[in-house]
Amino acid sequence: MSYDPRFDRYRSPNFKRPKPSGDRGRNSDAARTLWEKQSKPRVSGTNGPRTQQTVPPWPRWSQERLKRNKFRLWAVWAVVMLGGLGLAVNLFYLQVTRAPALRKQAEQQQTLKSKPFVPRRPIVDRAGNVLAIDRQVYTLYAHPKLFNHTKAEIAASLAPMLPVELSPGTTPETELLRRFNLGESGITIADSLAQEVADRVGRMQIKNSLVDGLELVRQQQRFYPQQELAADVLGYVDGERKGQAGVEYSQQNLLERSMPSIQFSKSIDGQWVPDRLTAGFVQLDDLKLQLTIDSRLQRAARIALKDKMKEYAAKRGAVIVMDARNGELLSVVAEPTYDPNQYFNFDLSRYKNWAVTDVYEPGSTFKAINVAIALEAGAVKPNTVFKDEGRIYMDGWTIQNSDYQQAGARGPSTVTQILKHSSNVGMVHLMRSMKSSLYYQALEKLGLGQTSGTDLPFEVTSQLKNREQFINSPVEVATTAFGQGFSITPIQLVQLNGALANGGKLVTPHVVRGLFDRDGQAFWKLPRAVPKQVFSPKTTKQVLEMMETVVDGGTGKAAQIAGYRIAGKTGTAQKANAGGGYSNKAIITSFVGIMPVEAPKYVVLAVIDEPKGGSGGVVAAPIVESVMEALINIEKIAPTKK
């Protein structure tokens, strides 16, 4: 058997190839001739005997093919091994490294924690009158495609029950018909419907049959029964149940009832099922957040303020009443205001209580504070005399009294007379009698450059020049002497005058009393800061007696109340321009009153921004007088003066 390289196999010597025919035969003969030539036996040597060796050659291409097959085998093996190694690494990563995170993710997908809806705590005034409370309301939707009566019949029956906003020339029936024609389903007809209205709509019948196609959706809403009365103090709650202004914002933690979360697990059918929910899980306390505000006084203050603002076409105004003994705010009114039930219908600027969030130059209402500083430092006495020229010049600036054109120079004047007539020039001489460094130190001690610390939100700090600028500039000392060149909030001015009323203690103005139960027992009370002594009782008594002359025969005569001793101080200040300097037209008028002088308890401040004409004694003093009369009736204060 010989090896045939053409077919990579051995064949028998007796094998005879079939004889080809035609061209194929000729080609086969040529191939056979070539084969025979290649297959001739080799001869070893030249002279020796010839030996025939039959060694079939191993084709090179067959060897290469074998090598390729081996390489493929190794490559497949390597891929399998690498794949297995990758799977092992990934398995370790998932089962060990990422196991905690995946377990947590699975729990999040399989469980759900949610807090049940719990109403916010009510807010009441000092007498227990409700100022804010949660209530159930309804939104009415119409689905006209489900109506079992005509649209006209339903509109005629529904119109008397709903508060429908009308366009000019329309009636409630036509307006409802217009809304019914807006679509086939899901038309909002009315929202914030009370329970009694919703009950009437649900029982409505036409031709002795209930009406189909009307849907009432229940929801919770914060309700303010007094509407705008205390909006400046209360603030409002938005659609996400978060307070956005007033005590609704600042006392969010007290108003929200704490309630543990309920855990839900997903059942086999995909429904959420609560875990370990026991009977009596949701328990509501009966606590209420009580404020120091008196609704009766708040109403009287708002009416008096609005009347004067309308009379003098003022831009805005504020009234604050504080109990000087403990800092309780009995009334905080700012105009213009808003109805917290419909806060979304008002401009954003109305949401802030500018008596707390804005500063202004207090003008002459700060003169009594300056007199107390000078008396406390021992620089002057009530009968110390200064020359009132009516007009002076300092570093190129002209300083004159507001009544200089009418009264001219008043000449020698005591400290009491200077305060009584609100002399700017006299105050400049008075405050220059003490070192400017001591004057600045006293202002810092009173809290200028800081806040009053009230619990009303968004209070800004008062503004005072830096020490170096104040001490080295005589003009700064002069302007500060009559209440300009620095800025303060109305709430902080009340705080400072409270120190004059209570014997020299700086109390913190506040509106929150604490949490009380239905029996009036205190569950939690607002912790009070220890009052800071800034003036001696002797000094405050002297200043109050001087301020009484302002009301009896000075610029504050409009605040007089027969039978009562009232101390006060007027203020009429030019408004500072944004670019520097002062406006020739815009002013701020104010009046601060303290009563009764013999046993001071209450501080009342009225501030009117940009009235068209008038002064503090003409515009603001009558407001304080009206508020004090209401206070006398509410607190039953007996007269002590004939």
Image (cartoon, rainbow, N blue to C red):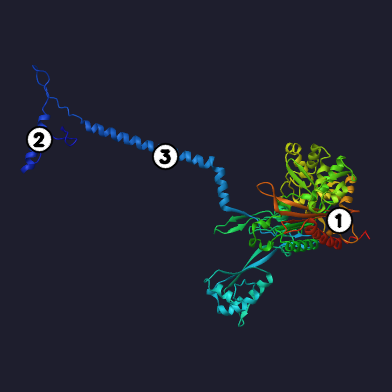
Q: Earlier in the sequence, mark 1 or mark 2?
A: 2
- For residue 144, above or below residue 106: below
Q: Earlier in the sequence, mark 3 or mark 2?
A: 2
Residue 474 in percent (x, y) is at 76, 39
Q: Secondary structure at mark 2?
A: helix
Label 3, label 1: how far apart the Cα atoms are? 98 Å
Which residue is most to the top? 47
User: In the rendered structure, are the residues bearing label 3 and label 2 in contact, judged by CB atoms less than 8 Å apart?
Assistant: no
Residue 551 — which label? 1
Choose mark 1 or mark 2, whichever is in front.
1
Choose mark 3 or mark 1, whichever is in front.
1
Q: Amino acid at mark 1?
A: Val
> Is residue 503 shown to the viewer in this render?
no
Q: Secondary structure at mark 1?
A: helix
Q: Quadrant of the C terminus?
A: bottom right
Query: Which residue is pictured at 6% across the width and 42% down the height?
Result: 23
Q: Quadrant of the N terminus?
A: top left
* 10 Å crowding of disc 3: few (<14), some (14-19), many (20+): few
Residue 537 in percent (x, y) is at 89, 46
From the image, tell me which residue sits under label 3: 83
> Is residue 488 shown to the viewer in this render?
yes
- For residue 629, above or below residue 487: below
Residue 32 — which label? 2
Residue 346 figure quarter: bottom right
